[in-house]
Structure formats: structure tokens, C-alpha cells
Image (spheres, rainbow, N blue to C red):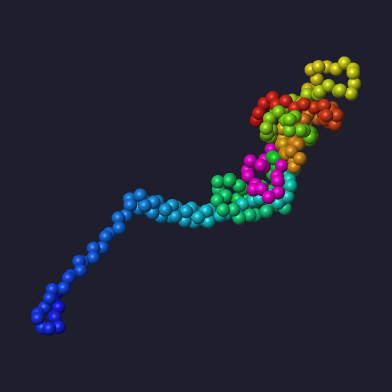
Amino acid sequence: MSLATRNGTGSVDAPVNPPKVVRQRRVRPGLLGLAVLLIALGGLGAAFAVTSVRATGSYLAVSRQVEVGREISASDLVTVQVAGGQGLRPVPASRLDEVVGKRAAVALVPGTLLTLGQITDNPLLGPGQQQIALGLKTAQVPARQLHPGDKVLLVSTPDRSTTAAVDAAGTRFSAIVIDMVSPANDDKVLYLALVTRDVPAVVALAAQGRIAVVLTEAA
């Protein structure tokens, strides 16, 4: 580049600035991979949300307490909307007519979804049987949870209020578990099917706190 001088002596070469070199920023492979991963996860999250919404359906839930063995009526149930309910296997609301009239195989608790495993067509009491309820402490239950159909043995324990000689083997009564529930105080209520002739003796022993429960066969 040339510049003219004031006294007309001619042009003088001026210094030329070197061209600026723009450095290209290098993209780290690790950051690029992280960006791709985040985009993929975002897509999966959106797909999961859409799937959950599409899986929403109408199912039956328990609206009030239903005791073991009692017939279920339409007023005991309510229809609720549940997202992703297929994994829980509740009873669809469309099957209400199939449920009404069946018996509760276990105690139905308000606010819970109804499942087919909680209802039955079969009578819970066989011929010559009656149902009783035993209130037990947690330590008196022979298993963490007793299930309908489990077979138990009720054994009388010694009467500590008397010094009379007692049978060390105790009196034994066979029974079948109908259900077991846990009240708020953490005690257990055990519902049993018992031969009618044994009911008076077992009720009397239970009132004295002289019953031990032994699990003999799991359902």
C-alpha cells in the first residue's frame, strides 16, 4: 500500500497489517457424545409420557369396607381413571356386572384398586363350617402373612389361673384361613373357617387368651 507525501517527493510504502486468522474451535468428542445422549434421553422421556397417557383407563376401586365372605354390591365400588393401570392388573370398569354378586375373598379396603384375586365365586365356608375371628398379637402369628386357604392348627395352652393337672399336649382344632388383616395398632385379626362343633370351645379359649396358632400347610 502506498501513501503520497506532503512535499511531493513521492509515495512511501506504509506498513500492512497481517490478515487475522480465525481459529476454529475444536469440538471435544466427549461433549458431542453427551449432547447426543441428552437428546436421546429427552426423546425417550417424551415417548414414555405419551405412552402413559395413552394407557389411561377406567378401573374399579373399593369405595367402602367389604368384609371377608360378604357379597359385593355396586355401591361398594367406584370407577376411577388410572394411567398405566395395565401393569397393576386391576378390574376394568366394564366388568362391573361380572363382579357384583361375587364374594370378597379377602377384606376389601376403601381407596384400593380391585383385582380378580380379591373376589371369588366359591363359598368361603364349606358344609358344617362356621367363621370365627381371632385377635392376635404379631408375635402369636406363625408367619409374616397368612393367606386364604392356609391350614392351621389351634392348640389350647395351659390355664395359669389353676393348679389342677392339665394335658401337656393341649386340645387341638383344625381350621382354614379365610383372611388376615392388620389394624392400625399393628395387632392381627385372623378369620378362620372352623368345624361347627369346635366353635364354642375355641371361642371360650380365645376369650381366656389360651390359643396358639400353628401353620401346618400353606395354600
- At a point 69% along the width and 38% down the height, the residue shown is 122
- At a point 57% along the width and 50% down the height, the residue shown is 85
Q: Residue 190 or 45: which is nearer the viewer?
A: 45
Q: Residue furthest bottom?
A: 7
Q: Residue furthest front?
A: 7
Write down the quadrant of residue 215 in the picture.
top right
Q: Is residue 50 above or below residue 199?
A: below
- At a point 85% along the width and 31% down the height, the residue shown is 207
> Does the magenta-highlighted stretch encompass residue 158?
no
Q: Is residue 31 left or right of residue 215?
A: left
> Does the magenta-highlighted stretch encompass residue 125?
yes
Q: Position of residue 55 (x, y in %)?
A: 53, 53
Q: Residue 187 or 20: which is nearer the viewer?
A: 20
Q: Is residue 210 left or right of residue 54?
A: right
The reply to whether residue 94 is visible in this rendering is no
Q: Position of residue 152 (x, y in %)?
A: 72, 27
Write down the quadrant of residue 120 in the picture.
top right
What's the magenta region? 107-128
What is the quadrant of the C terminus in the image? Answer: top right
The reply to whether residue 59 is visible in this rendering is yes
Q: Residue 70 or 7: which is nearer the viewer?
A: 7
